[in-house]
Amino acid sequence: MKHGFGGLRRGTLAILILLLTASCGGASTQDGAGSVGESPQEPSSNSSPMPAPETQDPATPTAVTAETGGEELGALGGECGQTATMIGTDVPIEIVMFGTKQYMCVVVPEGVTRVVFDLSEMTAALNLYVGYPDLSTLEAGGEQFWASEHGGRDDESIIIEPGDTGFVDPGSYFIEVSGGASADSASYVLTVSMS
């Protein structure tokens, strides 16, 4: 009795190779099918199609809920780090506070001549602060620190305009919205716009 493939006929050997190939995931063919004679796989019935992205009217606030200290407001990370939530620009964001302080961040690209931070529709007395280029500047104050001059529930704005260069410094601008005990569960609309 011979051992190995030496005693097998070529036809039998070819069928054996095809069977082994099919059981290991199939051979690649030009039409994208698995093994010879196999049709391309259809999507699994268990998978659901991705929903189409929703379009947002820029005048309609986007509802967002935030946790204390900037947790879970939106996408974390990027140039904002892990303690502030990165937000977009030119779209009003409706936010519900949990706690008395929230941190957000917006990244300003090069060539911007003005950045406006607007806080409106507050259901409690809130304060608006902006710091650049990091969160510690926002927390400690300093040269690149701005505070809104309005109090109570009045709309608040901070406008950052160019320095000597004619452009606003590019980079991360950190935003704090805070208030006393009445701030917990308060809502407001924040809009950051650039030109």
Image: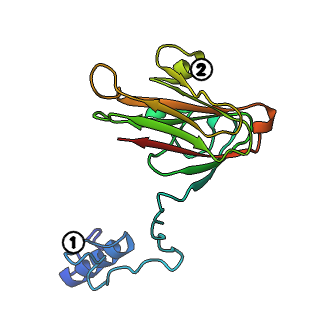
User: Which residue is located at x 29 percent, y 19 percent?
Assistant: 164
Residue farthest along the right direction in this orientation: 181
Classify mark 1: residues with Cα within 10 Å, few (<14), some (14-19) or many (20+): few
Give the mark count.
2
Residue 83 visible in the shown view: no
In the displayed structure, does residue 88 sit left or right of residue 170? right
Classify mark 2: residues with Cα within 10 Å, few (<14), some (14-19) or many (20+): some
| Residue 173 position (above or below residue 90) | above
Measure the C-alpha gap from mark 2 to mark 1.
79 Å
68 or 143: which is nearer to us?
143
Q: Position of residue 101 (x, y in %)?
A: 68, 32
User: Residue 6's mark?
Assistant: 1
What amino acid type should be assigned to the residue bearing mark 1?
Gly
93 or 77: which is nearer to us?
93
What amino acid type should be assigned to the residue bearing mark 2?
Glu
In the displayed structure, does residue 116 sit left or right of residue 46? left
Q: Which residue is mark 2?
A: 139
Residue 85 visible in the shown view: yes
Mark earlier in primary sequence (2, 1): 1
In the displayed structure, does residue 122 sit left or right of residue 9? right
| Residue 113 position (above or below residue 46) | above
Q: Position of residue 172 (x, y in %)?
A: 43, 30
User: Which residue is located at x 28 percent, y 78 percent?
Assistant: 33
User: Which residue is located at x 73 percent, y 45 percent?
Assistant: 123
User: Which residue is located at x 54 percent, y 35 percent?
Assistant: 157
| SS class, disc 2 | helix
Colouring style: rainbow
| SS class, disc 1 | loop
User: Residue 44's mark?
Assistant: none
Q: Quadrant of residue 17?
A: bottom left
In the displayed structure, does residue 142 sit left or right of residue 176? left
Q: Position of residue 185 (x, y in %)?
A: 76, 45
